[in-house]
Structures are given as structure tokens and as C-alpha cells.
Image (cartoon, rainbow, N blue to C red):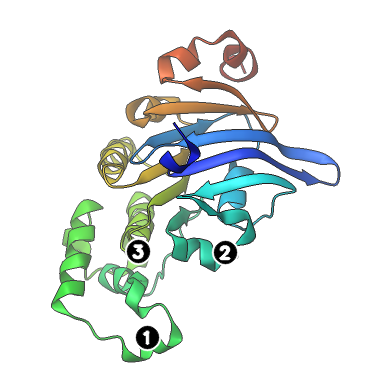
Amino acid sequence: MSISDYTLAIEDLTVSFDGFKAVDGLNLYIDKNELRVVIGPNGAGKTTVLDLICGKTKSTDGSIMFKNKELTKLSEHEIVHAGVGRKFQTPSIYENLSVFDNLEVSYPKGRSVFGSLVFKRTEEIDARILEIAKEIFLEDFLDMEAALLSHGQKQWLEIGMLLIQDPELLMLDEPVAGMSVSERQQTAELLKNISKGRSVLVIEHDMDFVEKIADKVTVLHQGRILAEGNMKSVQNDPAVIEVYLGH
């Protein structure tokens, strides 16, 4: 495959902090509609990779091509506009607004200052909000204040706030941390569902969860790729067992 066939093609990506290479010559390729999970011990560089893709951190070297667009030259908001959505570890939702209002505020047309001045709710927007609410298991909670949702529901709401912007690449950092067993199960279902229409990149520590969702697993160690493949091959890789699963 050529680079242009991938949704995301990362090549020779490096970032140094005071001489320490947090990410070191990384090559990572993600297909259209692929659900990729990145695992690795603490300090492996997982979150830094997401920071580099979304422009929060600037690379020292290398290339990040998203649908043939070089992201390393773009600002954070330009990367969002290009179609990259990111969810951080702690949910950032508007606690004092209802679930419906949280989704409405995130609707792309209301995004600019001018856009929000002339922003009017239409049947199309209402329908889209309802569609997303169903997808994130919150259709019965549209009128509820977001502060009253469970931890897992807040995580889903934040995923919904990204989905309503229709990103072509969605990045999630430890989406099931702190969730109940049933919420984890539903989140696995949700992520499989949303990867039917976009590429999804997930960082996760929970191996049972990874096994449920991953098309392909990438193992990072000290800023480099240690192993890559399906969950079974990765779990049986002696190098992976030594640095990660053995701890």
C-alpha cells in the first residue's frame, strides 16, 4: 500500500524533551475504518503520540500524514478542522448543561463566534443529536444535567460530542478507566460500531477490553514499536511478555 491509502501514516516521528526521546523514530500506519489499540508500560510514549497527532506537542522530526495532509505544520484547531477528534483521559463536558445541550454545543455549525450568533436549531440538527444519543446509549437521558450522569455515561457523552463533529480519525485515551463491567461491555460495542465509519485509535491498559475491540494492537516501549499484530500474536511475543505482561 502507498502512504495515500492510509487514513494516518506516521513516519520517523521523534520528539525529544531535554535530550530524552519520548517518541523515537516511530512508524505507524492506520487504515480506513480500522480500530487500532496502542498498549505499553507507563512511560512508553503512548499519550505523547496522541499529543503529537493532535498538535498539542510539536515533533522534533518526522511526518504525520492524515489523508495526505501533513499535520506537523498545522495548529491544534486546524487539525480538528481537518477531521481529527481526540478524547482525553478525564471527560471534559459541560456539567451544568443537559446531555442534549452538550451535544448541540458541539455541533460544527455553532463552532465559530459568527456561527454561534446565527446558529439556529433545525430538524436536521435535532435528528443528528438524537442519532448520536442513541449511539452512545444516552437517548433516555437527553434532558438530564450532565453532572448527574455516571462516570461511564460522562465518557460516552464526550465521545458523542466528538462524533457529532464527524471526525475521520477519533483518538481515545484510556476510555474505560473507572468504568463498571457493564459500561466496559457497552463501550466495546460502541467503539466497534463507530469504527465502521472512521478510523479509531485507542490507548488502553485493560487487556480484556483490548481483546474485545482491537483489529490490530501496537505495543510501544521506550518510544518505539516493540511488536504489532493481532492480540494473540502480541500476547505470545517473548519481548512483549518480558517488558509488559510480565510486570
* SS at mark 2 in the image: helix
| First-in-chain label (3 vs 1) | 1
Q: Where is residue 244 shown, x and y percent of the image?
A: 60, 20
Disc 1 marks a residue whose amino acid type is: Ser
Please tell me which of labels 2 and 3 falls first in the chain: 2
Question: What SS does tag 1 mark?
Answer: helix
Please tell me in which quadrant of the rendered image residue 5 appears. Answer: top left
Q: Is residue 132 left or right of residue 160?
A: left
Which label sits on residue 165?
3
Name the amino acid type tagged 2.
Glu
Q: In the rendered image, which residue does mark 2 sit on?
A: 76
Residue 188 screen position, x and y as percent: 31, 37
User: Taking 168 as reference, is 205 left or right?
Assistant: right
Q: Quadrant of the C terminus?
A: top right
Q: Nearer the viewer, residue 177 or 232?
A: 232
Return the mark for residue 116.
1
